[in-house]
Image (cartoon, helix red, strand yellow):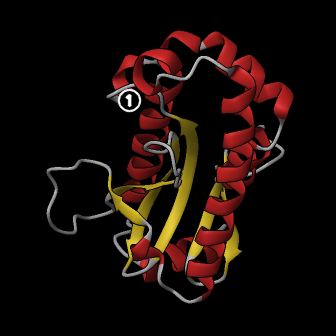
Amino acid sequence: MTFDSIIPDSLWAVRYDGEKENAFYQAFDQWSDPIWLRDFFFQNKNDLNEHFKITNIDKATYETIDNADKLQCLILDLALESNLEQVFRPLEPSRTGDVLLGKEKAKGESVQHSSWLRIYAIKVGDSSYIITGGAIKLTATMQERGHTLAELQKMETVRNYLISEGVVDSEGFIDLLQTQ
């Protein structure tokens, strides 16, 4: 795995071995692809209906494209201002303070309901994050579906890698980048 700078000194994204795009751009590319989205929502139509009461796959597709664009702009704008902590929250709702290389999530916004868009990251500093992936979360917990469980596993893999390299903060991460 390597790390691509999205916004210097505040936002990076993992580029997993064998992938052409990093995790940040890969998520937003999928969320702007109507064919990919229609297939995803068709495969997950029961979750979409059960948790969001939406049966129209076209509506879900268009809403996702619109919300993804807004989320990407929000993240990039906040990263430029070093204010990413305004959008990222602890993955575990019970966590009240900072932890070493904490797992974080950023949620999209939706007018009609809670957003199903998630960007997942590891926090490496006060306002520094490494994007590990993204998912459309249609269930109450990430463990309920394979695609969201895979995102949990990615976060844990990246976190364990950083720990094994001695990274505990943004300065350590910068040092790691300079050796790669």
* Residue at 69% across, 71% down: 5
Q: Which residue is mark 1?
A: 142
Q: Nearer the viewer, residue 118 or 133?
A: 118
Percent across and percent down for residue 175 are 53, 79
- Tell me if I can see residue 165 in this picture: no
The quarter of the picture where the C terminus appears is bottom right
Residue 21: % across, % down? 79, 48
Determine crowd level at label 1: few under 14, some 14-19, many 20+ residues with C-alpha closer than 10 A.
some
- In the image, residue 7 above or below residue 158: below
Number of numbered labels in the structure image: 1
SS at circle 1 = helix
Tell me if 139 is positioned left or right of 41 in this view. left
Q: Is residue 3 left or right of residue 168?
A: right
Residue 89, above or below 36: below
Disc 1 marks a residue whose amino acid type is Met
Query: Horizontally, is 81 left or right of 20 in the view?
Result: left
- Horizontal and vertical percent for residue 61? 72, 32
Residue at 61 percent across and 67 percent down: it is 12
Vertical placement of 148 versus 102: above or below? above
For image coordinates 83% across by 32% down, the residue present is 34
| Residue drawn at (64%, 49%) of the image | 1
Q: Is residue 2 left or right of residue 163?
A: right
Which residue occupies the extreme front position in the image? 112
Quarter of the view holding residue 142:
top left
Vertical arrangement, residue 168 with respect to residue 30, above or below: below
Image location (x, y in percent) of residue 147: 54, 24
